[in-house]
Every structure is written in C-alpha cells, then in structure tokens.
Amino acid sequence: MKRDLDRLCETEHDVLVVGGGVYGAAVAWQAAVHGLSVALIDRADFGSNTSANSQKTLRGGVGFSPRWDLKGRRSRIRERRELITLAPHLVSPLPFVVPTGDTGGASKALWRLALAGADILRADRNNGIGDPALELPRSRVLSAEDAVEAAPPLAGVSLTWAARWYDAQVYDTERLTLAYVRSAVDRGAVAANYVEASRLLERGARIRGVEAVDQLTGTGVELRARLVVNCAGPDAPALQATSARSRSLGGRAFVKGVNVVTRAITGTAAIGVPAIAGPGIAPRSLFLVPWRGVTIVGTAYSPHDVGDDPYSVDEDTVTSLLVAANASCSEARLSREDVRGVHVGLVPAGSDGRRPETRTTVIDESAAGGPEGLVSVLGVELVSAHATAARVARLVCRKLERAAGDSGAVDVRLRGAGFGSVEALLEAAVERLPQGIQRAAAAHVARSYGADFEHVYAIAERELPGHLGATDFALKAQVAYAAREEMAVMLTDAVFGRTGLGTAGHPGESALADAADVMAAELGWSAAEKERQLEAVREVYRADGVEPPSRFLKPLATPTPPS
C-alpha cells in the first residue's frame, strides 16, 4: 500500500471518502467491494483520533442498550458477530462481571431472568463464526467466590453474587481500521493519509469533489468524484459548511469521551461498577477493562465546547475516574502514578447534550434540501461501523445507479483473516518464530497481522532481527513493514498506528530510538529529522510538564514534514 497522490488526483473517482477513521475506512472498503472506484483521505493518519480512543470493546445485548431498545440490541449483536467473522485475529470474546448481590441492585432471581432473556435475544450470537475460541458463552449468575476469581479487585466489595456475560474486544483498534483500508486498496481503492479536505467542490447544485492540502508538502490538490462521503467525524460539520447549500449538520453538538489507561488490575474479566460522577461529567456506569497488560477505566463523557481543544483532558476528569474505580473496587488502589495514558475522543451528543448519541447518523444531503453528490455520516460506536458502512455503500450505489456487488460484503473477510482457526494461527506463529525473537512476540504479531504475520517474520529473518528496545513483543521488522507496506510516513504512525508499540503506555526511550532508526533508514531521514520525529512522539506522551513523559495518549499531532 503506497501513498500515491498522482493517482489520487489524476482521475475522477466514483466515491471519495473524507475521513479515515474506522467508519470512513469501512465505507471505503464496502464501496470497493461493491465494484465502485474509491478514494480515501484523512487529514492525519488512518484511525489516529477518536477511532483509536475507546475501551476497545464491542458491546451489545446485555447491560448496554436501554432495556426497551430491542431493535438496538439485536443490531449490535448482529454487528458484533460480523466483526468477529471479518477479523477473527483482531476480535475475541471478553467476559464482563458486574457485582449485584448486597449492592442495592435487583434480586438474584430477577437477574437470572434478565440474563436468560438476554441469551434468548442473542441466541444467534455465534451463528457463522465457526471457531469455538471465538464463540460467546452463555450468561450466568456467579457466586461471590467465582466472581472474585474472575475479577480479583472485587475481593474488597461486599457481595454475595454477581452477573457475568460475554461481549467482545478488539486487540488493536488502529489495526482494525488499517485492515479496512488495506482491504479497500486490495480491491482497487486509492488511499492517502495526511491529506486534509479544506473545501467541498460545488458545481451548480452538485458536489464534485474537494479541494485539499497535502500535509506533507503543503501543496494544494483538487480531488474529483461523482459522490463525496463525509466521514470526517467532529470535523464533518465544518467541511459540510463549506457548501452554500448543505446545513444538515449545523449546530451539531459533540461530547468528549475519556478513558484512563492504568496498570493491570482486573484479571481476565472486565468489571462493571456503579455510575461515576464528577464536575461536568454525565452519570454513567463505569467499566474496568483488561487490555494488553493494562486496564482501561471509563468512559467519562462531558460536553465539548466549540473552540476548546477537543483532545485536552483536565485533571478533574482523570481524578473522577480513579476515585470511582477505587470506591467501587477498593482492591484496585489506583493513584495518579498508575496512569499510563489517557484516551480521548469526540462523539455526537445525544438529546441532553451530555451523553453520546446511541444511533449513527447517515444523511443523503440532496434529500435533506442540500446539494446532490454528498452523503454525511456521523458514527458513534465501534461496533456499528461495519453495518453502517454497508448501509452507506448501498445508498451510494443507488445514487450512482450502479448495481450492488457482493451483497454488502457480509461474507467477505478483511485482510489477514485467511487462516483456519485462531488456535492454528497462534501455533503457526510460535512454530515459525524467527531465531532470537521472544515467544511473547508470536502472539502479538499473529493477533496484529493475522495470516500476514509471515511477511513480518520474513523481514525479521532476512534483514532486521531483534526487538524494539527492551520490549518482549514489538519487533524492528514491524517498523520496516509499516514503512514499506502500510503507509507509515511519520514515526507516530509506526509507534501508535501500526506496531502497537506505544498504545498501552510509554515503551521506553530505547524502544522509541530503535523504531526511529528503522524509520530513518527506510525513509531517508537526516539525523535532525529523526530527532524531530522522536520529539513528536514524546510530545504525544508529555503532559503538565511531568518528566519522564506522563504517558498521555492524545491523538497524533502532525510532526514537521520530512526534509
């Protein structure tokens, strides 16, 4: 996958997707599967903002949708199942444990009835998955002893029993987005990161593309398309406003979602605890989610004011999350020193302006009184990206009077998914482990790349053996592969968006230095440019003047372009 602006600019595409988060990437792939010529751009790196900042979970069915929203629950169950099938190396089951006995909640009998009803509602949750390791078990009520065994922090909670159900978790959300991008490119799409759409091209009553700027060179370009899909997330209203006729997103409010990454405290199960509260924070149930050797605590939502830094976090929000976690699970004993990062993202606000919207917005602008040739999408939940993309692709086909392709791509899997079972994949990654590589890397590389792990291994065997710094999971070969095959043009792209090196906390200066050395060799950076790239990564972690870096994981700022 190469960054080719000449190809991007030289032709009129059927569809131009603006915004390379998970929704935009999924739309690009679905449109390509339907046989359309597709272009995809993002102002930063693919999946580097809100799409990367979440609890990495695909929730649905139990304890998520409002009790009366049966349609919403059924939709999420179906969407979660499709994602497990599409990317089995990246998605896996995750148990959730909620202490219910002696906490003022419903009776045990009522919970048993509720869980049984939820299992009936999601009786088809495993249909078509075909791999026992990926199937979601039935829900059940646990004794206090079993609950503490599954979730050790509950040892300090007064309870007699707990509820347990299963949802799913994404191993690496950035690589899930990238899998959509690469799968679209495999089907003929052209994609480019660091291309910012500055204005819609309007010809009469129709949108014909966008004016854009190549962020790496500062060059203005014109991208032409028969139809534009605006998936720019919180930037979507501003792009839409460049059209004199389109106002459907005007005044759309957003809320800021915050998750705190801490040391591991939860064992193998996520824990659900009572609602958090704090200055400006909307009351909401709190989840402590285990992920790649850390715990993600959240989510806290608060209104976002236009003009404020969308990705800044004040200490009150972080403190509220830590206090709530400790109050609900006293064994956690979290302090500010345990914070390894803060994930931040903006999502559309619901009717009260304080909580997130629960349904994705898809607008055919011509039907809403706007110009022809423009579709606007505001995504909400990671789990809904695939189904929303299929819906948008069908709409685009109708508007372009084109026959649909592979029935919404339900039976087509993403790049890397071409293996028999997860167990077989992991066994193959261990058996073929290059000499000198630690065993922990086998699972990480297999889960990150799926069947493509062999491409990374080949580089490790022939050219770049060894790990990044003192890590036992990240390889120098991953960085080279990112630069050669995955359009990593900045060090931030490799560290956060391709290798998983820095997404669970600061990996250490030696690991960053090794990654910078590989990127410099691949892209021809000077010593000064390599240092600028390293400083851009450090800035991602740096907050409040704390040294060593405070390990905040904010969205990726665009560093100085390569010289």
Image (cartoon, rainbow, N blue to C red):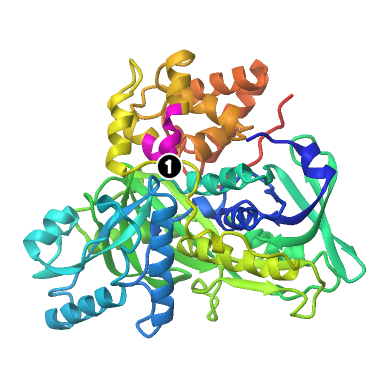
Q: Is residue 209 left or right of residue 249?
A: right
Q: Is 84 drawn above or below residue 174 in the view shown?
A: below
Question: Quarter of the image containing the C terminus?
Answer: top right
The amino acid type found where label 1 is placed reads Gly
Q: Left or right: 226 with respect to 52? A: right
Tell me if mark 1 has few (under 14), some (14-19) or many (20+) residues whose alpha carbon lies within 10 angstroms of its own: some
64 over 5 or under it: above or below: below
Q: Nearer the viewer, residue 511 or 464?
A: 464
Q: Quadrant of residue 190?
A: top right
Instruction: Return the residue found at the far bottom.
Output: 68
The prevailing secondary structure element of the residues shown in magenta is: helix
Q: Which residues are magenta?
A: 446-454
Specify whether 299 is left or right of 535. left
Q: Nearer the viewer, residue 40 or 43?
A: 40
* Percent coordinates x, y for residue 535 in the rendering: 58, 30
Q: Is residue 384 left or right of residue 184?
A: left
Q: Position of residue 7 (x, y in %)?
A: 78, 39
In the rendered view of the protein, which quadrant contains the N terminus? Answer: top right
From this viewpoint, is residue 50 visible?
yes
Report the number of discs: 1
Question: Magenta span has 77?
Answer: no
The residue shown at (62%, 46%) is: 187
Q: Nearer the viewer, residue 174 or 162?
A: 174
Would residue 449 be counted in the magenta stretch? yes
At x 14%, y 82%, the residue is 107
Residue pointed to by mark 1: 418
The residue at the point 83 percent across, 67 percent down is 243
In this view of the protein, can residue 554 be seen by the observer?
no
Q: Nearest the camera: 298 or 423?
A: 423
